[in-house]
């Protein structure tokens, strides 16, 4: 008999038995989508696909792998994000490292990046700036799908940029990384304009929304990447101001927005002198993406 993280580990157990045990423990702890979480953890440890996990239910799992499953399961039971537990997330065909200190890329941001890629003209080659890059998901996806683009990305967090740079090296994608604070007046001096496109998924939650968040987000993801303070529009004000300096004539802003504040961001950009400002809804029907053109 072996003990791992306070849990009993048997010398032999089948994949099916181990999966069922994991599901039961996750369900008892109130972890959402317990079965899918258990599947992800077992597939990661066993090095198999979901189909293979169910195709060979009687395949034995040795004690070392049982211990590894138990260790990952313990972290998930504490409500640590599954992506942190696994150490990666899939984003538009790229496997990106994520962990403490960096925001977990959301499906909404993946959808936004798809819209940006569809809108980018085939020629000439575009100069793109990703503000608040985090894991580098937007910048790296753009560079991967549009290798002709010159892509710059910035963040105020050194922890986030370290992870983004590791992702870039592993994926062999050439992105220019800069430490910069978009709220600083001197921000335009940190990045070399002019750009055809500035894209950003800035912090947009107000402090009072923290209690409404699941523990995976509230207790683990970096507050600096989540909260705008009590003014949910302050990052958009900064982007509007800097866009006039950094965008070429005819250049565009593309910003992810809080579902509750999409119309407010549209009005802010219009009052800031941008034209053809439009709000797009994501696949769930929520306001999610604001476009704004610098035409003069």
Image: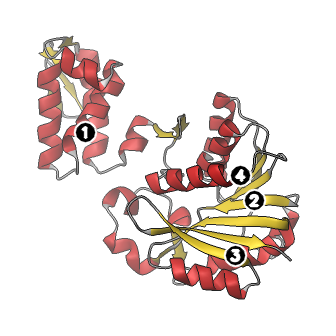
Tag 4 residue: 120
Q: Nearer the viewer, residue 292 or 34?
A: 292
On residue 276, the disc is 3
Q: Nearer the viewer, residue 263 or 134?
A: 263
Secondary structure type for disc 1: helix
Secondary structure type for disc 3: strand
Q: Earlier in the sequence, mark 2 or mark 4?
A: 4
CA gap, disc 1 to disc 3? 42 Å
- Residue visible at 37% across and 48% down in the picture: 81
* Residue 240: percent from left, percent from top: 73, 76
Tag 2 residue: 197
Foreground: disc 2 or disc 3 = 3
- Residue visible at 40% across and 66% down in the picture: 285
CA gap, disc 2 to disc 3? 15 Å
CA gap, disc 2 to disc 4? 9 Å
Q: Residues within 10 Å of mark 2 (few under 14, many from 20)?
A: many
* Residue 209: percent from left, percent from top: 39, 76
Secondary structure type for disc 2: strand
Q: What quarter of the picture does the N terminus occupy?
A: top left
Does residue 48 appear to the left or right of 9 in the view shown? right
CA gap, disc 1 to disc 4? 35 Å
* Residue 191: percent from left, percent from top: 84, 59
On residue 36, the disc is 1
CA gap, disc 1 to disc 2? 37 Å
């Amino acid at each position: 008999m072996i003990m791992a993280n306070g849990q009993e580990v048997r010398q032999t157990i089948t994949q099916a038995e181990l999966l069922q045990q994991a599901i039961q423990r996750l369900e008892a702890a109130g972890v959402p989508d317990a079965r899918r979480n258990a599947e992800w953890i077992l597939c990661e440890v066993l090095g198999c696909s979901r189909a293979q996990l169910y195709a060979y239910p009687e395949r034995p799992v040795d004690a070392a792998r049982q211990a590894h499953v138990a260790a990952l399961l313990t972290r998930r039971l504490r409500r640590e994000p599954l992506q942190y537990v696994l150490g990666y997330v899939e984003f538009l065909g790229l496997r990106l490292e994520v962990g403490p200190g960096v925001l977990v890329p959301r499906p909404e941001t993946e959808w936004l990046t798809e819209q940006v890629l569809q809108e980018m003209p085939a020629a000439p080659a575009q100069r793109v700036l990703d503000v608040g890059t985090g894991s580098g998901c937007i910048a790296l996806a753009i560079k991967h799908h549009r290798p002709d683009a010159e892509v710059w990305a910035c963040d105020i967090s050194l922890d986030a940029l370290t992870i983004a740079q590791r992702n870039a090296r592993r994926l062999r994608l050439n992105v220019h990384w800069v430490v910069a604070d978009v709220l600083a007046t001197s921000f335009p001096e940190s990045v070399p304009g002019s750009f055809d496109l500035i894209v950003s998924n800035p912090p947009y939650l107000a402090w009072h929304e923290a209690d409404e968040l699941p523990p995976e987000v509230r207790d683990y993801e970096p507050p600096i990447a989540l909260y705008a303070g009590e003014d949910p529009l302050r990052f958009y004000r900064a982007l509007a101001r800097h866009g006039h300096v950094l965008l070429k004539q005819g250049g565009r802003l593309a910003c992810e927005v809080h579902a509750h504040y999409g119309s407010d961001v549209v009005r802010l950009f219009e009052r800031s002198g941008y034209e053809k400002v439009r709000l797009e809804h994501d696949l769930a029907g929520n306001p999610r993406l604001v476009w704004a053109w610098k035409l003069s």
